[in-house]
Image: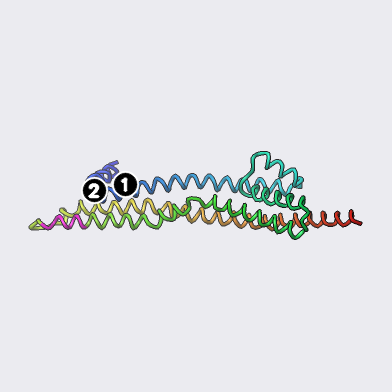
Amino acid sequence: MGEQLSILRLIMQASVPVQFVIGLLLLASLMSWAIIFGKRSVISRARRDADRFETRFWSGDDLAQLYRAIESRGGATGMAGIFEFGFREFARLRQSGAVAEQLLEGSRRAMRVAQLKEIDRLEHNLATLATVGSTSPYVGLFGTVWGIMSAFSSLGNVQQATLAMVAPGISEALVATAIGLFAAIPAVVAYNRFADQVTRLEVRFDAFIEEFSTVLQRHAARAAGAAVSQER
């Protein structure tokens, strides 16, 4: 408790520029923690939804019934959203009489668009974490340099300088560096972790698009075969 009060006293006694730097760093730290908790929830939900959808998709349910169930809920995100986009485009092109190649190409394009939107949603605010993590130490260092300069400049009118005279000023300045590291380290760790998790989800989405394209290819081949039989 004494140490906390000591740090608080150092901040209150620091010069105005150093206090401004410390306030800016504390604001950046609060913002990064808010992003960390929010992003953790979003990515965890995306992983759970992907697990549930894959289980249902490969359970053998009718694709049209699965699509209607998703659409009835007002759409979906993640892997279910990719499926929704792809199946909707496949059905639309099939009704317009497109050939098998056009069916597959159109559905794949629709799924890629849905994937890009989902990855953009998952990566939202990650750049802010990267910015906080990369700039906070330098902002804190600026406050430290300013504080040390002020501490030494105050010795200009002193006949005999001692360490006890500059120690408080240097201590106040070093608090800015400490707070800069306090803001930067969690942001860097969280950014690296979330970026890795988003990349893993993107790989899962890529794999699903390829697998679903194979399923649609079989559907297109059967539809083409049925059309040829009717013509005969």
Q: Residue furthest bottom?
A: 101
What's the residue type where badge 2 is placed? Val
- In the rendered image, the quadrant that contains the N terminus is top left
Most distant residue in the front direction? 96
Give coordinates of residue 121: x percent, y percent: 54, 50
Q: Nearer the viewer, residue 199 or 4?
A: 199
User: Which residue is found at the position 76% from the left and 57% from the top?
Assistant: 217
Task: State whether the magenta stretch is mostly helix, strand or loop.
Answer: helix
What's the CA distance linking mark 1 and mark 2?
Answer: 10 Å
Callout 1 crowding tier (Cα within 10 Å): few <14, some 14–19, many ≥20: some
Which residue is tagged 2? 16
Q: Give the SS element for disc 2.
A: helix
Does 172 appear in magenta? no
Residue 151 part of the magenta-drawn span = yes
Amino acid bearing label 1: Gly
Q: Position of residue 192 (x, y in %)?
A: 48, 56
Looking at the image, which residue sits at the far right?
232
Residue at left offset 59%, top offset 56%: 202
User: Residue 204: in sight, yes or no?
Assistant: no
Q: Quadrant of the C terminus?
A: bottom right
Could you say whether the residue bearing mark 1 is in a helix, strand or loop? helix
Residue denoted by label 1: 23
Residue located at (65% from left, 47% from top): 80
Front residue of 53 and 121: 121
Relative vertical location of residue 162 with respect to residue 38 in this rendering, above or below: below
Q: Is residue 122 left or right of residue 75?
A: left
Query: Front-most of 151 and 219?
Result: 219
Q: What residue span does the magenta drawing correspond to?
A: 149-156
For disc 2, the neighbor class at 10 Å (few under 14, some 14 to 19, many from 20) is few
